[in-house]
Amino acid sequence: MELAEISAFVENCIYDAPAPCSGGCPFGVDIRSLLRKAARGRLSAAYRELRTATVFPAVAAALCDAPCMKSCQRSLLGDEPLDMERIEEAIVRLGGGQEPDIFRIPEKTERVAVIGAGPAGLSAALSMAQKKYPVTVFEKESGLGGRLREHPKFDVFREDILFQLSKEKIDFRFGCEVTDLDALEDYAVIYVATGSGGNDFRLRAGWDEELYTTARERTFMGGGVCGIPTLQAIAAGPELSRLMESMIQTGRASGGAAKPRCTAHNLLPKNAQKAEHVMPADGEGYTKAELKREAARCFQCSCDKCMGECAVLGNYPKPPKQMAMEILADSGPHFLASRTMTRQVYSCNLCPECTDTCPERVNMGELFQLSRTARADAGIEPEAFHDFWLRELDFVSREGFFASAPEGKATCEYVFFPGCRLTGSLPEQTLAAQKLLTERFGAGTLLACCGASAWWAGEKALWEENSARLRAAWEQLGRPRLVLACASCGEMLTRLVPELETVPLYELLAGEENLPVSSLFRSAAIFDPCSARGDGMRAGVRALLRRSGTELEELQEQGRCCGWGGHMRTANPELYDKIAEERAQESEKPYYVYCANCREVFLEKGKDCRHVLEALFGECGQVFDISAKHQNHLRVKGVLTMDMQGRKFVPERHDWDEIELEIGDTVRREMECQLISDEDVKKCIHASFGGERFADLQGHFLSCLHERVMSYWVEYSQDGETYTVHSAYCHRMKFGGEVER
């Protein structure tokens, strides 16, 4: 992983960008900070902040027409925007009068020439003088001010300008017109600020509006002579001083990267309340108390929407750019990598919540996915987070794999792709759906996995292998359209095997007018899986459920992840439980779902819900354990093998299959929580038949089995041919072998 690769994901993040009001300010004033100080009555601090940004605060306060007010987020509520014109005037009037800041830095020797003592020249001269460069200002008129001299408030402006200049050494040469720039060869840099209609020394054609440079070496130009308005000309002074200093030190002017701005985004905080605009009692300027009340109306707008909406980012409240840098440092194979971001990277369920929430569409899920892939490539991934799911992928893709056209045909126009979870969770409903699709559409069957587990684990070789297997089966069946029951499958197949054409199962079923739909609830809410945002499945599901006569409710926030995706359950069980419980409580009504995983998550949390296929083909009424799901899948494969190919399917046999287990409800719940199957237990007990086991006085045995990255422990007792399981657990540690000393 490279810095540029990581940075590309978050470069548009506006977490720390100026607020919309600041984005519209010609001076880029940090209005949030300014109003925060004013609301607390810290008017001296507010004045210093205003002066630093505007150079000449009294001039800015009088001339600025407050474009920031057009971007005030209060307007989105129908409120009056913050009254920045009166606020700024009050800050200058009530908080001003402080001596200008003096910067204790070494004196420079390189001389700076400024041609013109108007607002542009004065701003640049002051900014360079504050850096302790010797500055000479040449002005053909008898005094400073330039175009400001025509303003009725010039006396106020002049006082403010002289006050801000009072602590710096600037050599003003009034009545001195420069006609030839060659006469200023002794100066390190020259700034031409001769004002509107002034002498441009024939440099206008080669002027760079971003760097203010000209075709003449070490010569800058700006202000009215370049058509720049007064306030923008003053605002350019600090940036010009940086560019001129860069020219002095390096021989070239270099501009910094533009900071993202959020001028057009809705950043209203949740539960934002209206607040009445404060009007001054005298109809003119604010008192201190009035200023504080008006400033307190500011929402302090900033973009943290991703952290507010995404449970993962909210659980680890770091700005996206900070997370990106930590991921970069964390993902390498070198010994200095701290792995502090590992759990967060693998806690993400890779749903599009952060992207849909972000005004700039920053995709943190893709960044986490990139980190997972990089870790897997480097051999530093936490394998235990994914071990169970990858073994499930292996089961469905090998022993459970089945691809066939209807009986008597080699190819088909449609093929039902139920996904890896539906067959185990709702076997009868899967078979019923397949039968209907075969009868109505001549559909074949493809029992396989879309590869989500490998993708979520970052195991590129595995998902490429799985994708190749799917592509080969699809080609052999005549490149049919895949009928999908799972939105996650649609998302994965579009990403990994984009040439496959898919159609939602529920869209096809909704087109069957005579298909009856049972009403399992009088009233229910529809829970859309996170992978179905904007997906065609949504419309088909709703069309079917409306036929049932059930009163349907739409959740306020649709497409929120139930917690199952991305392997969060193993990477961060506490966060998984929190998210699942929050999703279950989004409505008091029972849920209709169309994701097998959502169904199981909610039923396990005690939330009454049904899959839409249960309304079509009968209720299931239970959640199967891991081993039962495997048996269900193989049974579905067996039925389809006979129906479509006229032959009997014989599952693989293993030495441990004959072991009979007795498992109580408590132990069963513990096993399911730790994702331990009956097969894992049987293999562990079988491994102890050679005598390698612990025994206690009560006749209990403790056996251990190390499988790939996990160690399984089973405490059991034997009564005839039955093995009673008293406890089963697993962990990532491995015991055995010699210990080096």
Image: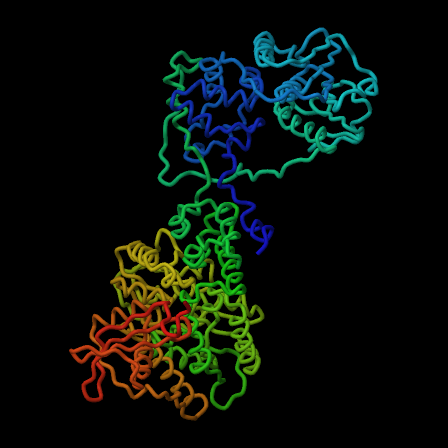
Instruction: Give the image quarter of residue 395.
Output: bottom left
Q: How is the image coloured?
A: rainbow
Relative to residue 63, is residue 554 depicted above or below? below
Q: Residue at x 63, y 36 (%)?
A: 256
Residue 437 lies left or right of residue 610; in this view the side is: right
Location of the N terminus by quadrant is bottom right
Tell me, yes or no, if residue 11 can be seen here. Answer: yes
The single residue placed furthest to the left in the displayed view is 698
The single residue placed furthest to the bottom in the displayed view is 647
Residue 79 lies left or right of residue 202; in this view the side is: left
Question: Looking at the picture, how far across and down is residue 658, in whole percent?
Answer: 29, 88
Location of the C terminus by quadrant is bottom left
Question: Looking at the picture, how far across and down is residue 722, in whole percent?
Answer: 22, 85
Q: Residue at x 56, y 52 (%)?
A: 6
Question: Looking at the picture, how far across and down is residue 514, in whole percent?
Answer: 38, 74
Residue 132 lies left or right of residue 306; in this view the side is: right
Q: Residue at x 66, y 35 (%)?
A: 255
Instruction: Give the image quarter of residue 731.
Output: bottom left
Question: Looking at the picture, how far across and down is residue 474, in whole percent?
Answer: 54, 78
Relative to residue 732, is residue 694 depicted above or below? below
Instruction: Give the image quarter of residue 235.
Output: top right
